[in-house]
Each structure stands twice: as structure tokens, then as C-alpha cells.
Image (spheres, rainbow, N blue to C red):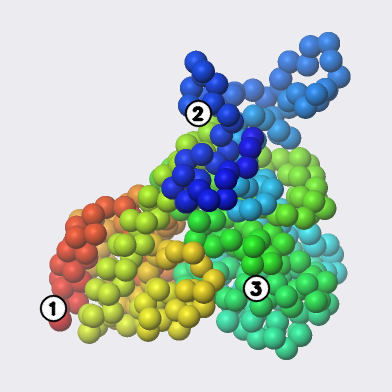
Amino acid sequence: MSELPEEWGDGTRSVRAGEEAPVPGAPLRPSPVFAAPFHLGDRPPRADGADAYARTEHPTLRAFEAAVGELDGGRCLSFATGMAAITAALMACASAGDRVVLPADGYYTTRLLGRDELDRLGLRVEYVPTPAIEGLAARGELRGARLVMLETPSNPQLDVCDVAAVAEATRDAGALLAVDNTTATPLGQRPLALGADLTIGADTKALTGHSDLLLGHVSTTDDAVYARLKSWRDHTGATPGPFEAWLGHRSMATLDLRLTRQAENARAVAELLAAHPRVTGVRWPWRPEDPSFPLASRQMARPVGVVSAVLPDEAAVARLVAASRLWAAATSFGGLHSTLDRRAQWGGDDVPPGFVRFSCGIEDTTDVVTDLATALDAALGGP
Ligand SMILES: *Cc1c(COP(=O)(O)O)cnc(C)c1O
């Protein structure tokens, strides 16, 4: 698989990432190769790079990993879910007794992984709110850490953290920096280029973007870290199968188009919400009024399709869902459909009862905005 020319744009890169040189008579995209063991014939296992057993390698996975790695700017290992990828990053890089810093306001299950599994195995896990991790970095208080994890923009509160500044501090401290880049995707932010050692994606979300797959990945430019992660995956077995990998690769081709429409919709939705007198706390890092605006504009390549805001209470959110035709209540985000999620119902995020994460889909902007405006008026009373 060849590297893509630097001058190609995001649309071209999304389509061509991970593709082999074209072969006359062959399909434009290879089909999935379904195999658990491969024929060894009369040759020793893995002679000339031949595949042997799909838990450790298979051709469909290689193509998908080449594609994601191409966009991330590193070598990618794909996992069965986002959590399998996060688990690999933490467990392959840290050991009992090591100090590990996790975001206190990040993805809830990452914190549960720390509390219920990593603590038990003797890792010294600290939970620090995303904005405060920058403070630790600035004060040299990451010394003694083995691994620092950031989630930026954080989910669901959309705080943006300065990756380059934290990367400098982790480097000085001899620690590794891992960034959960799920919300941004590799087209929105390239943590490895900003100095992170690992970038992680829950590809269940926007990268594959059709709300029908579970996948995750870790990319790195560090060969030793790559080898540790590969060993972890080979031994623990969270390898995606061929159909998942093929669907993930196929879905990625439209990433640029999907993100562009989602961002247009998010801009309009953020404005609509901000203008409503009974909606508060609107967060979208590309509104000039947003506290993360200056950093997001500098650090990120494009806006995300997720907006968060606070409605007066739980009942108001229920009325909003009932009054809407296009905004479905669903967790997860980054898909084709516009969805909203009242986060407090899950019990894991420190947010008010009416806090809603809006994930903008790829429907027409006029339609999602008109539908949301009508539903807001029905739920909250007109402006
Ligand atoms: C969804 C999500 C995950 C976990 O991904 P799964 O595929 O559900 O395991 C991790 N981090 C973030 C930021 C997420 O949104």
C-alpha cells in the first residue's frame, strides 16, 4: 500500500486511503476475505508474509488499518470496539504501580475501566478534568506519570485541550500521551502531528458514521509502542473480523462529505439553540462566544457535528423528543441521523438533568433546523 500524495485533499484521501494500486479486471475495492486459518501449504507459517491465522492478521484488516493510519499519520491497529482500543492503549503501556492520568469528564466507560479494572490491577489512576490537565502540564505536575490520556474535544461537554502543550509536558516527564480523538476524527485533528504518542478512535462513531458498526483503533509513530499494542491485541484477541473491517473501510470513503454536512448542520443548530431564551450553556467550539473557540480554531482542522446545550429540566427534553420528527433519542453520535441524548439518564456524566448532546446528521440543514425549532417551541414555549 502506497502513501498518498501530500497535496491531496480530505475528500480524495478519504476515498483512496488504504487502496492498492489498481489492477485491470479487479474490483475498485477488494471484497472481504473470510478466513480464520489460511492454507499453509508446504511452507512454514508466515513465509514471505503469508497470512496464517486471522486473530493476528488478515488482508481485509490490513487494508482498513492502512487507511486509518494514513489519515492519522501513523501505524494503526484496529480493535473490535473503541473500549478495546482504549484498554489496549492503557494496558499495553502501563503496569502495576504506574501513575496514569485519565480525564474526569471524558467518556464514562473509560472511567469505569479505571475504577473497576485498572485500580484492581494496581495501576495508580488519577481522574483530572480536561481543563485542569493543561494546568498540571503547565506546572510540571505530570512528572512521575507513565501515561496521560486526553479526550479533546471532550465528550459530552466539548472542552478542547491543548494537545501540543500537554505533549511537551509529558515528553519532559518521560510519560506517554494518548489522545481519544473520537469526536474530531483524523480529518478534524491529528494528535500525532501535535506531539501525542498514541491517537485513539472509537470508530463506532463518526469515522465509520452509519451507526451500524462497533470498531476502534490506536495509531502511533513509535515502533516500540506499536509492538506492545500488537502483542496485547494478539494475546487478548480483540481483533475485528473481516466483515467489520471491510464495512469500516467502505464507510470511511465518505468521511469528508459526512463531516462537512454535519458541521454545517451543527453551526445552524448551535445558533438556533443559543438564540432560544430558555436554552442555556450552548457549547460548540466554533462559535466565537465559546470558551474553546481560540484553541479549537488553532488546533483543529475542521468543526465537529456535535453540539451540547442545557434545557430547563428532564421533562422539557422528553417534550422535545416527542415533538420532533427528525431528532431521534439515541446515545452514540457521529452518524447519518440527527440524534439527541439526555446524558444525565446514564448516570455517568456530571451534568444537569436537562443537558442534551445533539449529534447532527447529514440531513438537509433547513430540515433539521426547522424540525428542531418547531420541537423547541412545542417543548419550551415560543421565544
Ligand atoms: C463511544 C466512545 C468510546 C467507546 O467506543 P465503543 O466502540 O462504544 O467501545 C470511547 N471514547 C469516546 C470518546 C466515545 O465516544
Q: Which mark is residue 10?
A: none
- Viewport quadrant of the N terminus: top right
Please tell me whether residue 166 is drawn above or below residue 305 in the rendered image: below
Q: Residue at x 36, y 62 (%)?
A: 263
Secondary structure beneath label 3 = helix
| Residue 67 or residue 156, whichever sits in front | 67
Give the mark count.
Answer: 3
For label 2, the residue is 29
Tell me if mark 2 has few (under 14), some (14-19) or many (20+) residues whose alpha carbon lies within 10 angstroms of its own.
Answer: some
Q: Is residue 109 visible?
A: no
Give the quadrant of residue 321. Answer: bottom left
Secondary structure beneath label 1 = loop
For label 1, the residue is 382
Tell me if mark 3 has few (under 14), some (14-19) or many (20+) residues whose alpha carbon lies within 10 angstroms of its own.
Answer: some
Q: Residue at x 45, y 79 (%)?
A: 293
Residue 245 at what x, y percent from top left?
56, 37
Q: Is residue 11 left or right of residue 312?
A: right
Give the quadrant of residue 275. Answer: bottom left
Please tell me whether residue 103 is drawn above or below residue 138 in the rendered image: above
Q: Amino acid at mark 2?
A: Arg
Q: Amino acid at mark 1?
A: Gly
Tell me if mark 1 has few (under 14), some (14-19) or many (20+) residues whose alpha carbon lies within 10 angstroms of its own.
Answer: few
